[in-house]
Each structure stands twice: as structure tokens, then as C-alpha cells.
Image (cartoon, grey):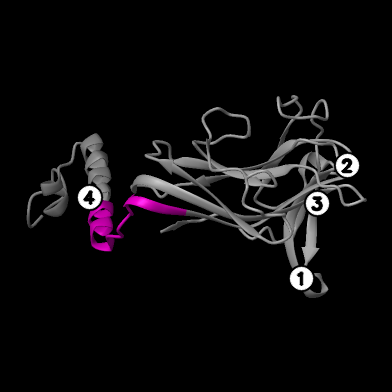
Amino acid sequence: MNIELKNPGFAPPYDRQGGDKHLHVARGWRAWWSLERAEDSHGGEHHRPEYYCKRYGEQGVLACQGWQTTHATHRAGVYQVAALPVGARITALQAEIRARYFARQPDGKRGELALRLGLLDGAGDDGTDEGIQWGEWRGQTDGSGWDGEGWEALSASLSAPVSGQVTIFVESRCRWPVRNNHAFVEGARLSVVGGEPVVPDPEGDVVQILSEIRDLVAGIYGFLGVTFQEAEGQLPGREEGS
């Protein structure tokens, strides 16, 4: 069973987050970043990336979310809070997203950029939250040979969520302040992979509604000093036949 996400394909329109002209984020998603220097960064403090809509495909008919820093490193990404089905007994969730990147100098020298996907039990907005369950890093240093030119699937899982919400986080991180440090994502999905989904029960819902209505009416009659028997038979204080 898939959990509904807002704009999982990162389609336009793209809104200016906080009114900032350098933060164009796909509607339904939010940008996050950290300016703290990472231990594995060789570029000093991280910079806030510029976020934008990246067109690709024939005649630019397709779109994805992009963010970049120029001659600077970053630790940043996007996130979305999703509501879980009420009443579902979920024991495991899995998220997936497609990603690609471009990190190199004009002379072709490559930088080191990697991405990962994570899930947080509950609503959050901080990609450095220690409660996030991250999937594996994918990038130029993972030994897979992925050079960022083609789309690659990222995944993450979360066991036994106890909140009624879950937050999907995407993070990219780069070590060297090369001229181009770009990250791109599209095609997000969140699925229940363990547990029991909500099973619709229209008949039970009707019975529940009728029961609630009866309780409400009983409360009104009780306030007026009238019983159901009196209400269903004759008016209070009035004899039959009168």
C-alpha cells in the first residue's frame, strides 16, 4: 500500500520558499540545509545551496528538483511530512526516490558528492536530526561506479512507526568546493511493507454513525426530562386519546 505524497514527481509549479528568489522548491516539498562544517569536508563551512527547477528530456518536457553550490561544499536537501492512514497497524515503511548529480571542475576533475534518503518517525524539518533512519550513501565514493550521469534509486526504511506522521528526507553532501556541485531528485514513493492496512467497513461505519446520533438525541431528551419511550410513544404529560 502506497502512502499519499504531495507532488512525488517534483512537477511545477515551484514556489519561493520564504519569498527567497534563490529557493525555488517544488510545491509540497521544503528545502533544508546545514551550515556547520562536516568532518569530511575540505571546503570550510558548508554553504546554503541555490534551489531550482531543472528541466530535462526532449525539449525540456520533464522536470526535477535541483540544488547546487558553486565553489563551495554543502550539506542540504529536501523533505516532506506525510500523514499515515488512521487505524492502520504499520510495522514497516519503505521510501524510494530517484537521484543524480554533477560534481566537477570545468577541466573535468571530479569532486566527491553523495546522496542518501532517510525517514523520521513524526513531523520534522531538520535534516541533521539524530532520529532519522538513513539509507546507504550513493555517490562517487561508494564503489558502485555510479558517476551521477544516470538516474539511480535511493531507498530507506523505518520499522514500527508510532506517530501518525512520517518525514522523508533527502540529503546530499560534498567534500570538495569544486565549481559545480549539483544534486537532482525526482519520483518519490512511500510504501507500507509490513503491517495491516485499514480495511474499509461501510456497514460498520453506518452503525457507528447511527449509534452516535442516538446517543446525541438521548442526551438532548435527558436534558429535557424526556425518555426515549415517551418520545417514541406519546408526548410527556399527555394521555392517550386526548
Which of disc 1 and disc 3 is earlier in sequence?
A: 3
Which of disc 2 and disc 3 is earlier in sequence?
A: 3
Separation of residues labelled 1 and 2 (CA atoms): 24 Å
Q: Is residue 193 left or right of residue 131?
A: left
Q: Residue 70: which disc?
A: 2
Separation of residues labelled 3 and 1 (CA atoms): 16 Å
Residue with the mark numbered 4? 211
Separation of residues labelled 3 and 4 (CA atoms): 53 Å
Secondary structure category for the residue under label 1 = loop
Q: Please say whether residue 168 is one of the residues in the magenta stretch.
A: no
Q: Nearer the viewer, mark 4 or mark 1?
A: 1
Residue with the mark numbered 1? 57
Task: Identify the amino acid type marked 4.
Answer: Ser
Q: Residue 52: which disc?
A: 3
Secondary structure category for the residue under label 2 = loop
Task: Identify the amino acid type marked 3.
Answer: Tyr
Q: Is residue 227 left or right of residue 202?
A: left
